Image (spheres, grey):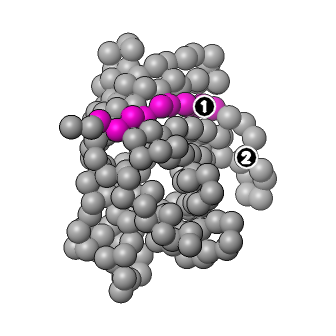
Amino acid sequence: MNTIVFEQFFADCIGNWQSDRTYHYLAYQEIERSQTTFEVQPLTSEQKSKVLLDNAYDQLDNLESLPGFNLGFYTISEKGEEKKQNLNLMFVPKSETNMLLEGDYLRDRAYEEDRPIVSHFSFDPKTRELLMTTNYTRVVSVDSITLTNPTLRIRQILNYAKPSEGQPLENVLLAGFGVEQKILN
């Protein structure tokens, strides 16, 4: 049951999106607003295979059934700062309980550090929330996308100072919130 909702979540994500976000930089008490346009296209099995290879991840037999995307985005902040990026990403489910689907989230380029990276994801089929946790060198990024309906996503991003091994996440450096609407033709 969870995998059907999971597959529909990703099918609904394909297309073009407009995002309005607010970032709170807690370390230096600054608030920034930005707008982002996303283009989300499915990956072919060959592209998924390359994402696995880039991450030194074991090749998998079921590539067609795994969600994977090419994500292109362009962001402009209220200060006029621009960022453009294009990356390939995929999700490899590893365990399913009656509450959550969990697994690995792979990218050929990370957001905080320009390198391939394997992260963790969990998906709650009841709330349709995808939670992605990435351990970077200096921060741990916890990114949530909740698909409220096929044309509206709510986004939350929390970046924590990376704690010592075995310690909980508690020092929030950045909190971001966004509303993402699908652009319908």
Residue 119, percent from left and from top: 52, 60
Residues in magenta, as a range: 173-183
Q: Which mark is residue 129?
A: none
Residue 54 appears in view = no
Residue visible at 36% across and 58% down? 11
Q: Residue at x 28, y 47 (%)?
A: 15
Q: Residue 169 — which label?
A: 2
For mark 1, give the secondary structure. Answer: strand
Point out the tag, 2 or 1, that comes first from the N-terminus.
2
Q: Is residue 176 magenta?
A: yes
Does residue 91 lie above or below 20 as drawn?
below
Question: Looking at the picture, how far across and down is residue 66, in whole percent?
Answer: 39, 72
Q: Is residue 48 above or below residue 115?
A: below
Q: Quadrant of residue 24?
A: top right
Secondary structure mainly formed by the magenta segment:
strand
Within 10 Å of the Cα at label 1, are there few (<14), some (14-19), or many (20+) other Cα atoms? some
At a point 27% along the width and 60% down the height, the residue shown is 42
| Quadrant of the drawing holding the C terminus | top left
